[in-house]
Image (cartoon, rainbow, N blue to C red):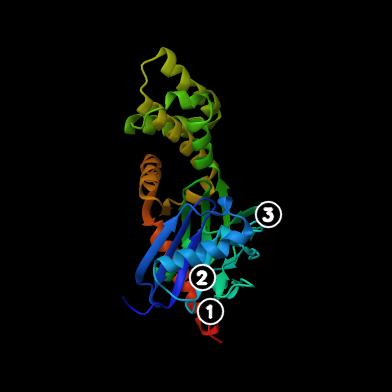
Amino acid sequence: MGDVSFIAVDWGTTSFRLWALEADGTITAASDGPFGMANLKRSDFGSVLEDSIAKIGHGADVPVVICGMAGAAQGWCEAPYLQTPTPLHALGKGAVTVRGSTRDVRILPGVKQMSPANVMRGEETQIAGLLHHHPDFSGTVCLPGTHTKWVRVADQSIIDFETCMTGEQFAFFSKTSVLSHSMIVDGWSDTAFADAVAAALDDPTSVPRLLFAIRAEMLIGEQSGAEARARLSGLLIGQELVATRPFWDRGNVTLIGASKLCELYLHAFDQLGIAGQALDSEAMTVAGLVSAYQIQKETFHA
């Protein structure tokens, strides 16, 4: 094991991921668990962090850099938003020190946009990771997930962004709504997905009625559960693409996210003639945290 310079943490609403890192970003140990902000009281954060660090065997002298919802108003210690246009190097400079912690712990800020109103926490660190590896990057970044972000990046800054609740919509329709009865099994149909994307792109106003048609096709048609799941995903992603046209109409998008979800967006991009490439979200998160650490590392032991 190399010399650990700091602990990096991605603290989300439902998840917690921790890495012990050398100064250059080499991972020497990792830990994760269901310790998201939504499951914790403010007084729990410190003990969760220390217990997780103890599991990988590092002492109290190793500093910590955190991104994500631990910095929200309802999290551990609020890290105020930076306002767009936001230079990504400002994330490290804007880190907030957690008071009362026996360890030097810094939480990175999120990013806000005043008009139209929008916020992000965590995604900005992944974009900083992209710039850490590709400092000359300029263009559109899409970060698919529960709340998918579409972000314009130029001059090593977040210029503006939009958020679509596509992932949350899919979770609601597939697990809670009447459509959940059509999706009691896992499965997939590439054809059904492509057809649904095409239908939403051709006439986005048809999506509300096509959603219920998924259920009707299960009751009186021959649609399978796999086709139903794929149709739902295709309708929602197609609808999202219509809403975000200004971000992709120049024809090239970089995706940062889970590989399976990015694959769906890439298939949809193919139907629009959009060039796209996908990057691993964990790798970009770690790189963004390394970038923030390197900016402020001289202050950790001051």
Q: Locate residue 98 relative to residue 148 in the image: left or right.
A: right
Front one among 36 and 190: 36
Query: Which residue is the site of mark 2?
Result: 65
Instruction: Name the mark on residue 85.
Output: none
Q: Residues within 10 Å of mark 1 (few under 14, many from 20)?
A: some
Query: Which residue is the site of mark 3?
Result: 115
If you read the primary sequence from the N terminus, does the residue marked by circle 2 or circle 3 appear first? 2
Image coords of residue 260 (percent x, y): 36, 45
Q: CA distance from mark 2 to mark 3?
A: 30 Å
Instruction: Name the mark on residue 296.
Output: 1
Q: CA distance from mark 3 to mark 1?
A: 30 Å
| SS under mark 2 | strand
Q: Residues within 10 Å of mark 2 (few under 14, many from 20)?
A: many
If you read the primary sequence from the N terminus, does the residue marked by circle 2 or circle 1 appear first? 2
Q: What amino acid is labelled 2 in the image?
A: Val
Front one among 253 and 112: 112
